[in-house]
Amino acid sequence: MIVLGIETSCDETGAALFVDGKIVADRTTTQLLHEKYGGVVPELASRAHMRLIAPAVKGVLEDGGVAVDELDVVGATYGPGLAGALLVGVSYAKGLAGALDIPFIGINHLEGHLWAAEMMFGELKTPFMALIISGGHTLMIEVCSFGIYKKLGGTHDDAVGELFDKTGRMLGFPFPAGALLDDDTIRFHEMKEAGDIHDNPIRFPRAKVKKDKLGFSFSGLKTAVLYYLREKYSNPKETLQTRSNEMQFSIPEHDRIAISAAIMEAVSDMLINGLASAWNNRYKALVVSGGAASSKFLRSNLINFARERDIPLIIPPPEHCTDNGAMIAWIAHRHFCKGNTSLLNLQVDPSASLFTC
Ligand code: KG4
Ligand code: ZN
């Protein structure tokens, strides 16, 4: 079975080929052009997908040694994501499927993240609990079985990656800032271990959601970081009319490293608190995915959390945590095996839900 998967929900243009049980080719390009804008510019993302999608597909066919007329099925992310960006991938996939007279499958992006770990670790046994931490989502999910998903709790405001990107911008980082905050945090802990610095004097508040509710809130942390920076450092643009995305401060590197670490520590504590409340021993594993799950700091804290409680923890390698075409090809093959295909009039759905119960 040969499956082409296409991912264009946000700022990664991805194509991948699944051939007889494994991913044999995967080309995912991150659109760096958004860096200077402090976030993804939807119109520019769509145009970049238009430019990148055909070479990505041609590239994976070459890498996999597959002729286009050997494809059995084409899957593409239909939501959630940016409408214009989704349209590029879905239209391309439908055009190709129509021309080749093969099935097309619309894939929910979050379902791709949920099962991405299978590409490396083999079949995930259900029921399992998943935590998706990405730029657009922070969700705890009960995966009852393939296709049956229940929401356990999510963020009431910002997503984890969004918080990293927004606070990272205040610290002067380009977009996306998550990996840079993470690098700072690792440096902070290396310096601490070497005895060069002591405990972090900065501690941001950890928001708690109501006792009987599962979920997270990160906007208070974002505001706390902003107030802290306003009090301690000057904003070079403060005299101008400033929009919130222009709140950048002049911070000495040494201070910035401690602030980055304080942000990551607060996020890590909140995530682990949420997981501890939602975890149930009947789950066969805890699966963590999404771009922010590439964080070395979060991964190491999650490993410790799972070890202490004897929870089997599964996290895909970083390149399969961030958006990629491979997870879409993978999940398209899963659906195709179950006989699920989509009509060629399927619409993109920017706020597509994953939940079935
Ligand atoms: O899953 P993803 O690639 O795209 C969405 O579906 O949103 O996640 C992107 C997010 C961004 O907010 C980015 O800052 C964050 O993942 N991210 C990281 C790291 N790499 C990407 N956050 C922390 N540490 C990283 N190494
Ligand atoms: Zn994603």
Image (cartoon, rainbow, N blue to C red):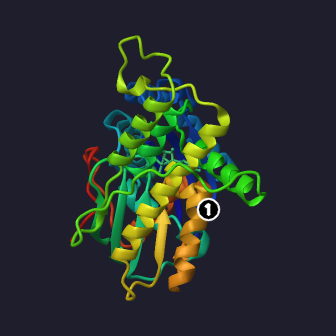
Identify the image quadrant of residue 127: bottom left
Q: Which residue is mark 1?
A: 317
155, 248: nearer the viewer = 248
Regarding residue 244, the answer to whether it shows in the image is: yes
Position of 20 compared to 239: left or right?
A: right
Position of 181 compared to 163: left or right?
A: right
Q: Position of residue 186 (x, y in %)?
A: 66, 53
295, 51: nearer the viewer = 295
Q: Position of residue 265 (x, y in %)?
A: 52, 56
Position of 66 compared to 87: left or right?
A: right
Q: Position of residue 200 (x, y in %)?
A: 59, 53
Residue at image point 37% right, 56% down: 138
Q: Label 1: how many residues lie within 10 Å, few (<14), some (14-19) or many (20+)?
A: some
Query: Which amino acid, by three-letter code, is at mark 1?
Result: Pro
Q: Position of residue 166 (x, y in %)?
A: 44, 37
Q: Where is 32 relative to 215, above or below? A: above
Residue at image point 35% right, 21% down: 243
